[in-house]
Image (tube, coloured by chain):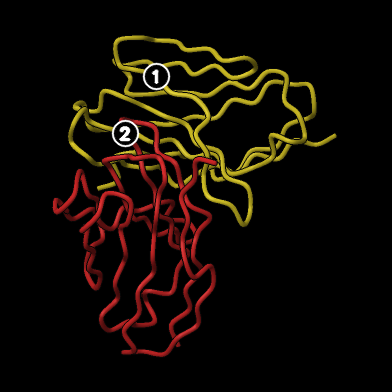
Amino acid sequence: EAQVTQNPRYLITVTGKKLTVTCSQNMNHEYMSWYRQDPGLGLRQIYYSMNVEVTDKGDVPEGYKVSRKEKRNFPLILESPSPNQTSLYFCASSNWYTQYFGPGTRLTVL
Amino acid sequence: DQQVKQNSPSLSVQEGRISILNCDYTNSMFDYFLWYKKYPAEGPTFLISISSIKDKNEDGRFTVFLNKSAKHLSLHIVPSQPGDSAVYFCAASVTNAGKSTFGDGTTLTVKP
């Protein structure tokens, strides 16, 4: 089954404790992206990658890091999480315009 | 500067009637537009799209209209069904730019 998977689905952590949210796709897509969804703010792009070893900032990259060492994986790294990073995070992949989204990761930073 | 705007946070319609969701954009470089649907506790799923070379695209009950001069697009759902109740996001892209810009979403409620 073609899909985008994210782990964990839910995470509660404390300020400053480094965390990684994994994202994997099995559709051989070149393009992958991370978004955060906050009430009243829609989906805002954090980082995107157009191919292996190619990443670029989206609209809200501050406080986040990403890497793209393999085509299928695109982890999101929060080196020192803060409460304003409490949000719902979505990973997506695509070969052209249409994006396929993962189920989401709900992160709470205390 | 919000480049893609959905000015109606919510819309309520009766089952069987038409639902019209609107989206405005400011960046004239956008050349591809998409609508996504999102149910609670799930990721958004692709619904329908339109290229800037067209002004209408239809897929079953869903039709998207694009008015380039007004920088406006709309999604029509006819007839609306209770299962259409969800959040609808409008998105816009520039070819090969790698970025998609989303609107804030419109919550559609279809009442039986």
**Measured from the top left, where is residue A11 in percent x and y?**
50, 77
Q: Which is more foreground, mark 2 or mark 1? A: 2
- Type of the residue with mark 1: Ile
Chain of the residue under label 1: B
Task: Tell me what residue is drawn at x 31 percent, y 24 percent.
Answer: B32
Chain letter for red, please: A
Dots 2, 1 in contact, CB < 8 A: no
The yellow one among the chains is B
Residue occupied by mark 1: B50
Chain at numbered mark 2 = A
Closer-to-camera residue (B72/B79): B79
Q: Secondary structure at mark 2?
A: loop
* Residue A51 on image: x %, y %: 19, 45
Q: Where does the image place residue B85, in percent across and percent down from the top left?
A: 69, 39
At 30% across and 58% down in the image, what residue appears?
A: A74
Which class describes the residues within 10 Å of circle 2: few (<14), some (14-19), or many (20+)? some
Q: Which residue is mark 2?
A: A95
Name the disc covering residue B15, or none: none
Number of residues whose C-alpha sits closer than 10 Å to that of mark 1, classed few (under 14), some (14–19) or many (20 or more): many
- Please name whichever residue, B15 or B9, is drawn nearer the observer in this view of the structure: B15
Relative to B53, is B62 on the left or the right? right
Q: How many callouts does the rendering have?
A: 2
The quadrant holding residue A1 is top right
